[in-house]
Amino acid sequence: MATAGQRLRTTDQASASGPPETVTTESALATLVDELSEVPRYALDTEFHRERTYWPRLALVQVAWRSQPEGYPRVALVDPLAVDPAPLAKVLGGPGVMVAHAASQDLEVLGRACQLLPGKLFDTQIAAGFLGYGSASLASLVERFLGLRLAKGDRLTDWSRRPLTASQVAYAASDVAYLLELADVISEQLALRGRLSWAEEECATLFARPLSPTEPLEAWWKLRDNRQLQGVSRAIAQELAAWREGKARALDVQPRMVLPDLALLSIAHSPPASASTLRETRGIDVRHLRAGAEQEIMAAVEAGRALPPGALHVAQTEQVSKELRPAVSLASAWVAQLSRDEQVDAALLATRTDVVDFLSGRAGARLGEGWRARLVGVPLRRLANGEASLALDGHGRLLLEDRPVVAAGGARA
């Protein structure tokens, strides 16, 4: 494995390969697509804005690739404000592996811009999680594994303004320039620990996640203090939040611009009996009631009142039986300890939802499949069945230990 100093020289040489190419024409994009379609791997990142819109507005696509296996990386910046990026679908649908960092939002953006997702993906943030780095930034991983400090840029810069400044170009290029090398080093370490297949399996799960930001009937889960809602207030919150989500999508605006959270919660807690009462609700402004919204809000309130109990969508963590709640708490504590022992990000090992799914016996529970079954699922099943117990080792560390089986009559087997 190369030393940090050797890697530093390599990345210095890579950065000396020239400034990034800016792609602003259909012909230049076609040439880039043809070249990328021939390489086994390419790095990709996107810059976008969604502060005022529901759907992300793509502002830049950065790609890096090697023309030769040991060659210096080349970088290109595709300007979607000057050329339609849709032809990149040929690259995404090709045999090459897309290397990205924290790719979930990039997948959403690419899905809308190119109507296609990559066939293969290696996410360096996910992969680093199997080496103990939880939700690590690209800059921190590049410094840790490559011995290079990326230049700090303004991550809140306006990427929709043209022309891009020199600092913007440099910052955007640095997001992909070292991804391929970073992926190489992380993959080497994962292979040494026998975890490369774990990372590849986890990266593939990104494709199974919904690309839309929120399922409308689950939008009310994101409301602050939603657990304080009781009875019919929960049903009204569900229907009203679902209406707001759908409206925001149709208008391509942030949900809070359709109806603020304060107004939504106020309506759910004290449902208005009439339109005049609605206008007096805290958080409501006249602009929120225009273009038929007043009638639509009242209709959502009535739909909530009439909602059958079984039609209420509640988070799975709320569906845990009273008998299982102590087991979920114990299991979560043990998972946190296992994360430290195995140097794997706890969120990758098992979320609370994963624990609930597994202990509840739900079909397709993640802890019952693949590498998680052996590392997490089997021990948790023993804990839940009373075959094992948790104990402290005197240094604050939790141990999962075999529990003596008590035979009939109280004798230990």
Image (tube, rainbow, N blue to C red):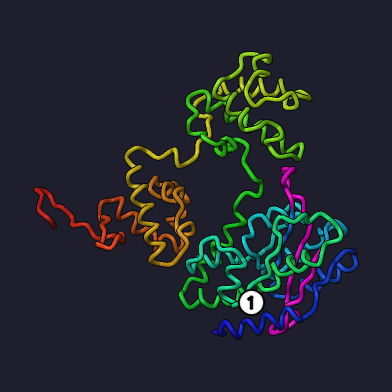
Please name whichever residue, 395 or 209, is drawn nearer the observer in this view of the structure: 395
Name the quadrant containing residue 155: bottom right
Q: Please state if 145 lies on the left or on the right of 285 as rendered.
A: left
Quarter the N terminus occupies: bottom right
Name the quadrant containing residue 278: top right
Please name whichever residue, 152 or 60, is drawn nearer the observer in this view of the structure: 152
Residue 300 belongs to magenta span: no
Residue that numbered label 1 is attached to = 181
Please name whichever residue, 123 or 412, is drawn nearer the observer in this view of the structure: 123
Mark 1 lies on a secondary structure that is helix
Which residue does the image show at 64% across and 76% down from the upper left? 181
Please name whichever residue, 279 or 354, is drawn nearer the observer in this view of the structure: 279
Q: Is residue 326 above or below residue 109?
A: above
Binning the other alpha carbons within 10 Å of mark 1 as few (below 14), some (14 to 19) or many (20 upward) gives: some
Which residue does the image show at 51% across and 73% down from the upper left? 190
Name the quadrant containing residue 98: bottom right
Q: Is residue 285 above or below residue 140?
A: above
- Disc 1 marks which amino acid? Glu
Which residue does the image show at 77% across and 66% down from the upper left? 167
Which residue does the image show at 48% across and 24% down from the upper left? 231
- Specify start and end residues of the magenta stretch as a single range: 49-78
Q: Please state if 297 lies on the left or on the right of 132 as rendered.
A: right
Residue 50 belongs to magenta span: yes
Q: Where is residue 5? Give x, y as percent.
A: 59, 84
Quarter the C terminus occupies: bottom left
How many labels were placed on the picture?
A: 1
Q: Where is residue 126? Give x, y as percent.
A: 56, 63
